[in-house]
Amino acid sequence: MKKWAFVSDFDGTISKKDFYWLVIEKYFPEGQELYHKWKRAEMLDIDFLSEVFASIHQEEEQIIADILSIPIDEHVPSFIKKVQENNGDFYVLSAGTDYYIYHILKKYGIDNVKVFSNEGQYREKNVYMNIDETHRHFSKRYGIDKSKVILELKEQYEHVYFAGDSEPDSHPAAYADITFAKDALQDILKEKAIPCVAVETFEEIEAYLRSKGVLL
């Protein structure tokens, strides 16, 4: 069994802006109402994202440029290197799509990171998600069940740390050894009585792990 792994959500955790918000603001103003419909639980997460991502109507070159404009937590690249230098493995776990995640990881020269997410591809001027209902991580609501991924990793590692920021992250948080919670996830976990470490940046996460001797 390996020693430890750090698993992070992407949108709003590694990145400072959700890709779906970028699409809504630039190309799909109707998505504002769709967003509220989703938040009222009148749509499944995967249906909301699929409709937004299929409403871009731009050449791939423009979509990639938009993706690369998304700001990330500036400390993430060095944090990932620190994890790897200290015999940890780093994973990205997202209920969005790997299409934009891979572009951003490449931009920052982030290597040796496995991405668990919904497979995405550019097609007909939009981004489409390929959801495999037979996959072992399948979730009807999110496309990917983050809890299943964390539980699977816990069979491979002595310790699994997790970072997230929103409702989908509350489910895997119940199984991680330590969850670092940003933004809305802090209150959600408090309501569910799931312990967490409240943070705003990866710099704070690194400081915490150093204080516990996980990082040297």
Image (cartoon, grey):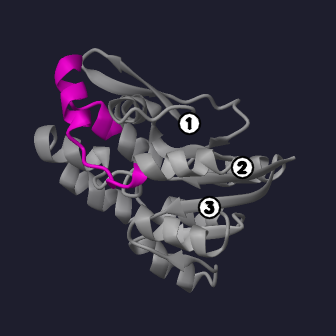
The residues tagged by marks 2 and 1 sit, at their Cα atoms, a distance apart of 19 Å
Q: Nearer the viewer, residue 49 or 108?
A: 108
Residue at mark 2: 148
Question: Is tag 2's residue or tag 1's residue first in the polypeptide sequence?
Answer: 1
Q: Residue furthest top?
A: 124
- Contact between marks 2 and 3 (CB within 8 A): the answer is no
Queried whether the magenta region covers residue 68, the answer comes back as yes
Q: Amino acid at mark 3?
A: Leu
The residues tagged by marks 2 and 3 sit, at their Cα atoms, a distance apart of 26 Å
Q: Amino acid at mark 1?
A: Val
In the image, 32: left or right of 146? left
Disc 3 crowd, CA 10 A, few/some/many (<14, 14-19, 20+): some
Residue 54 in the image: above or below residue 191: above
Residue at mark 3: 215
Queried whether the magenta region covers residue 143, the answer comes back as no
Q: Is residue 181 visible?
A: no
Q: Which residues are magenta?
A: 51-76
Question: Is tag 1's residue or tag 3's residue first in the polypeptide sequence?
Answer: 1
Name the spot of residue 175 as percent of width and height, x first.
Answer: 72, 64
Q: Element type at marker 3?
A: loop
- Contact between marks 2 and 1 (CB within 8 A): the answer is no
Name the spot of residue 151 as percent of width and height, x first.
Answer: 76, 53
Residue at mark 1: 113
